[in-house]
Amino acid sequence: MGEGPRPAPGEESFTELLAAGGAVVERILSRAAASPPDFWYDQPQDEFVLLVSGGAALEFPDGTVMHLSPGDYAVLPAHCRHRVAWTEDETLWLAVHLPEGGSR
């Protein structure tokens, strides 16, 4: 079991841990990272993210900010526009991308 690549400060690294049945599980390491100001994730599938360590905040187009501490999670429905507002220097996420149309 490897740790995955360590990104530069302000960056993130993504390591696919498992892909099966249309679902993908990935490890994300963020180092004081944030999405660019005009960038929004808009994914075709539902996503579950668990903050394993560190701290982060997700921002939504209506101005809502969700602060996450270790053990907190978010369920992001398909096409739920969101961005990473900020992360602490060492923030570890576990993300599960569900098959398109398969989680409801």
Image: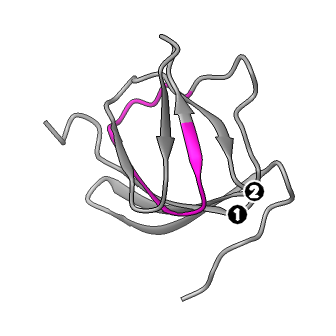
Packing grade of label 2 (10 A; few <14, some 14-19, many >=20) is many
Asked whether 27 or 62 is in front, the reply is: 62
Q: Which residue is identified by label 1? A: 90
Residue 104 point in image, percent of width and height: 13, 36
Residue type indicated by callout 2: Arg
| Residue for point 53% across, 34% down | 58
**Which residue occupies the extreme top position in the image?**
62
**Which residue occupies the extreme bottom position in the image?**
1
Residue 50 point in image, percent of width and height: 41, 56
Where 37 sits versus 17, above or below?
A: above
C-alpha gap between disc 1 and disc 2: 5 Å
Please say if the residues under marks 1 and 2 sit with CB atoms less than 8 Å apart.
yes
Residue 63 point in image, percent of width and height: 52, 14
Where 100 sits versus 40, above or below?
A: below
Identify the magenta region.
41-57
The mark that comes first in sequence, 1 or 2, is 2
Q: Which residue is identified by label 2? A: 31
Left-right relation of 16 to 38? left
Packing grade of label 1 (10 A; few <14, some 14-19, many >=20) is some
Where 79 sits versus 14, above or below?
A: above
Q: Residue 79's mark? A: none
| The N terminus lies in quadrant | bottom right
Q: Element at badge 2?
A: loop
Q: Does residue 52 show up magenta in the picture? A: yes
Q: State the colouring used for the structure image.
A: one colour
| Residue for point 77% across, 69% down | 6
Residue 56 point in image, percent of width and height: 59, 46
Residue type indicated by callout 1: Glu
